[in-house]
Image (cartoon, rainbow, N blue to C red):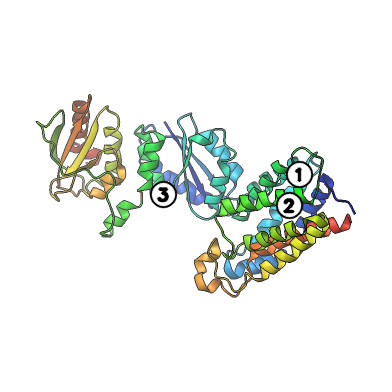
Amino acid sequence: MSDAVSTDDLVAWIRAFRDAVHAHKDELTRLDSEIGDADHGSNMARGLDAVVAKLDPVPATASDLFKTVGMTLVSSVGGASGPLYGTLFLRMGPPLAGDGEADAAALGAALRAGVEGVVARGKAELGDKTMIDALSPALDAWDAAVADGPAAAARAAADAAARGRDATEPLVARKGRASYLGERSAGHIDPGATSATLLLEALRDTLAGAE
Amino acid sequence: MIGIVAVSHSRALAEATVHLALQMGGDQPPAVRVAAGGPDDDLGTDAVAIAAAIDEADSGDGVLVLMDLGSAILSAETAVEFVTAPERVRLSPAPFVEGLVAAVVTAAGGADLAAVAAECATAGEAKRRQLGDGASTVPDAAPPASADDTAGDSLSFEAVVSNPSGLHARPAATFVKAASRFGAEVRIADLDTGSAEVSGHSLLALMALGVRQGSRVRVSASGPQARQALDELRALIDDGFGER
């Protein structure tokens, strides 16, 4: 397999994320109806449709790609996922400026910059029942597997994200709309952690295809 | 004059609130822009639209942004990354309605960004005080009044407020705007309740004073245009702020 991830691979990842959100749109909305305002699936699907519409022609570099994705999401999602996912992608671009291809370490560093941007924006910590509960363990798993190349790192990250997502079920939400429910938010999987897991599974599937 | 941007999930909510605030903005209100509603005209917020509204409202004196809740705050924070002059943008923690009213009135009086932001930061106080929360504090309360006609360069007059609802929002806003037009530090005290003096430049402090019809107030001023400021304010009070 290739140790390098091309801009085309990253474009394919974004398209795959859009497809995954569409495939799970009803599930995301159902999860959000239990502890939020029932719009996570439709908001993310709308935002990612707007993103995919801007990927033709394909951006020349990874940093151009992520800037386009981020700016489109902050403008067309509508809910809090817009600035949060938007910031994730906006922060991923600068670390990837320059080279045409990224190795596992470079892509991991970009993901970390993106997730740190989400933390700074949303002020959420691990255990608050948010997307961070999927993203943060995924980063650690990526770093642990980085020597095995990007496909293996993405596989480890997606598995860790799914475990983090499932672990949100008993938690009481401390951020976002769900936090208004207090104790009643326990017993439900967090929709943001669910869509964040789709993001990493889409990366896993995309890079596995290139393997 | 500073500009103001109203950020809400709902365009209808933002426009109605701006309408309410501009009723107290006088003849020369500040520039107020609305950035509200998401894609498809649904409820939501859009950081790019917020950034455009901030740039539009900025004449060079800066912009204060008022937000409702949730993603409005996240989107406004994100928008600051996209504006032309982020160092001239402040996001206010004030409640949306009270904050917008205070921002419009204070900005119309010519206050700078820091002063308007400080005024809005206490925008929840008047309501808390009205409802009897003893823990509240009146913004800009002065030390025990000692000024009178002969003290230093401070001048003052006493007058009875004749407005049926006392110094309620609209006359209070008129007072603040008039007081802020002159090179003078204006203060006002309610002699019937024995209140401490408060700043005559703060709408919220004035409303928190809760001056009722028939109450006697003392208005004092110091500074190069103290005399002109007091003449104008006395005329306004005697005229019932045009409400009679």
Establish whether labels 3 and 1 are both on one chain. Answer: no
Q: Residue at x 66, y 46 (%)?
A: A91
Mark 2: amino acid: Gly
Numbered disc 2: secondary structure: helix
Establish whether labels 1 and 2 are both on one chain. Answer: yes
* CA gap, disc 1 and disc 2: 25 Å
* CA gap, disc 3 and disc 1: 37 Å
**Residue for badge 3:** B94
Q: Chain of mark 1?
A: A
Numbered disc 1: secondary structure: loop
Mark 1: amino acid: Lys
**Residue for badge 1:** A54
Mark 3: amino acid: Ala
* CA gap, disc 3 and disc 2: 39 Å
Give the percent coordinates (x, y) of residue B158. 12, 38
Residue furthest to the left in view is: B150
**Residue for badge 2:** A108
Q: Chain of mark 3?
A: B
Q: Nearer the viewer, residue B236 or A145?
A: A145
